[in-house]
Image: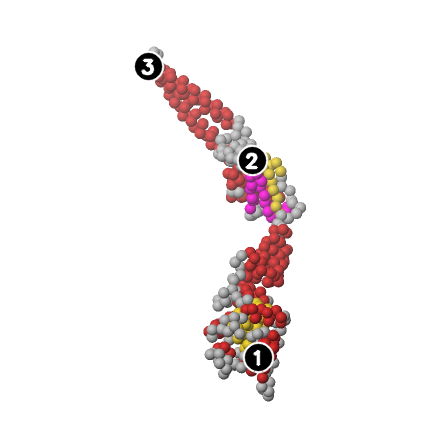
């Protein structure tokens, strides 16, 4: 429920207490949305097909050729850059090789993770069938190791080709120097320079030969599978805690939003607390407690003339006027006479709980305010029985006396006075 703009009521939802009060008022709607969210989460879990996840553990080792070094951090202290290796394992080249090995057109995507401070890759594949998940996980691991070995071998072959090309150039230059030495006379400067150049070239030949021989004997060790994927016995998804918690949270949020919207759109007054919260009028008493009603109204009324208005109007005001006229030192008006609004010092509203709305109360307050009649508060009632139709065959003597202010405490009649204090 939301307060009307004409009544200075406190807006709901400004602090935690107001939110809790809102949920207490709309607990049924909130609980329904909460349970509906949990039910929808369970239904969605039943409709979601199961999926199985298989994981293969691969130990990555240096292949014997220079590789990109890993930046040593608190997370990763290995020399290999396993983050780069994880990206390679997810590459299209490895996926194509895995598809060929698994004999499928398009394999399931692989998820590669690196445990901290390790040289291990965890290669996980999720598939609808457990055997398919295990087979494709193993295929990815074998394809990655084969790709790593091929890359290392290609790097070694490329280095060997470079060394052979360099060795060929050095041998050619060495042959030219040897031919020059045969033509130069010993002891001359030209002969000494040629001999020195020959020695340098001989050392280069020996160095290149050693490098070439070392590359021919480098072992290619891309890594190994330390844990082969096996078909999982239980599905990895859907997860009951995840779906149930998600549904309950969604229902919680939906219920809170629906309760807030419903509370702002519904302006019907159902309790005395609603009257004070939505209209800003103090709830003086309940009609079911006449003694409390008389005491509260007499204490709040600033004058002797009190006007009673019913909201809705079909309730009538006799149920309030009768006890007040009989016991309270007030002249009670029901608004039936033309001069009631002019004589009234204050007004009290009789609000039928469950039928009256904040808009109707605000309209009544505005009408009385235009005539200069302040509203001191509200009297609530749960008796929504309409007032009986007046008997046109007999004049309502009591109503006239009460309306004209001639009935005082104890039932004594008084003579109405004019504004100068003189009898009229």
Q: Which residue is mark 2?
A: 117
Pointer 1 local density, CA inside 10 Å: few below 14, some 14–19, many at least 20:
many
Q: Which residue is mark 1?
A: 407
Label 2 residue SS: loop
Looking at the rendering, the stretch of residues picked out in magenta corresponds to 109-133
Quarter of the view holding residue 388? bottom right
Does the rendering let one see residue 270? no
Q: Nearer the viewer, mark 1 or mark 3?
A: 1
The x, y position of residue 235, in whole percent, is 64, 48
In the image, residue 205 above or below residue 246: above
The furthest residue to the top: 187
Label 1 residue SS: loop
Q: Which residue is mark 3?
A: 189
The x, y position of residue 213, in whole percent, is 50, 25
Query: Which residue occupies 48% across, 26% down?
Result: 212
* Relative to 216, 132 lies left or right: right
């Amino acid at each position: 429920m939301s307060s009307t703009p004409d009544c200075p009521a406190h807006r709901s939802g400004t602090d935690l207490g107001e939110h809790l009060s809102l949920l207490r008022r709309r607990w049924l709607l909130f609980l329904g949305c909460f349970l509906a969210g949990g039910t929808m989460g369970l239904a969605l879990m039943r409709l979601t097909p199961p999926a199985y996840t298989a994981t293969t553990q691969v130990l990555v080792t240096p292949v014997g050729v220079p590789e990109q070094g890993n930046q040593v951090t608190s997370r990763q202290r290995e020399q290999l850059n396993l983050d780069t290796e994880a990206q390679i394992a997810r590459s299209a080249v490895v996926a194509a090789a895995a598809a060929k090995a698994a004999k499928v057109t398009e394999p399931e995507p692989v998820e590669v993770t690196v445990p901290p401070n390790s040289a291990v890759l965890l290669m996980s594949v999720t598939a609808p069938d457990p055997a398919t998940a295990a087979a494709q996980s193993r295929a990815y691991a074998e394809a990655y190791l084969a790709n790593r070995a091929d890359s290392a071998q290609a790097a070694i072959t490329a280095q060997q080709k470079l060394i052979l090309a360099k060795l060929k150039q050095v041998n050619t230059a060495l042959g030219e120097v040897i031919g020059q030495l045969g033509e130069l006379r010993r002891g001359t400067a030209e002969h000494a320079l040629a001999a020195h150049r020959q020695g340098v070239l001989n050392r280069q030949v020996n160095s290149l030969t050693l490098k070439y021989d070392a590359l021919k004997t480098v072992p290619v060790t891309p890594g190994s599978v330390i844990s082969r994927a096996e078909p999982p016995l239980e599905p990895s998804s859907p997860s009951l805690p995840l779906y149930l918690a998600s549904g309950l949270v969604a229902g919680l949020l939906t219920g809170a939003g629906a309760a807030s919207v419903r509370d702002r759109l519904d302006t019907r007054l159902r309790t005395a607390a609603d009257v004070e919260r939505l209209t800003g009028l103090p709830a003086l008493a309940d009609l079911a407690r006449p003694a409390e009603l008389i005491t509260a109204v007499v204490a709040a009324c600033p004058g002797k003339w009190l006007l009673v208005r019913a909201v809705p109007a079909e309730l009538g005001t006799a149920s309030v006027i009768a006890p007040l006229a009989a016991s309270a030192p007030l002249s009670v008006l029901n608004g039936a006479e033309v001069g009631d609004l002019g004589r009234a010092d204050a007004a009290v509203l009789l609000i039928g709980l469950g039928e009256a709305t904040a808009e109707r109360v605000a309209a009544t307050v505005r009408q009385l305010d235009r005539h200069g009649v302040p509203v001191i508060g509200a009297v609530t009632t749960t008796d929504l029985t309409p007032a009986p139709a007046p008997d046109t065959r007999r004049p309502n003597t009591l109503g006239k006396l009460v309306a004209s202010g001639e009935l005082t405490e104890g039932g004594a009649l008084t003579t109405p006075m004019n504004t100068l204090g003189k009898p009229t």
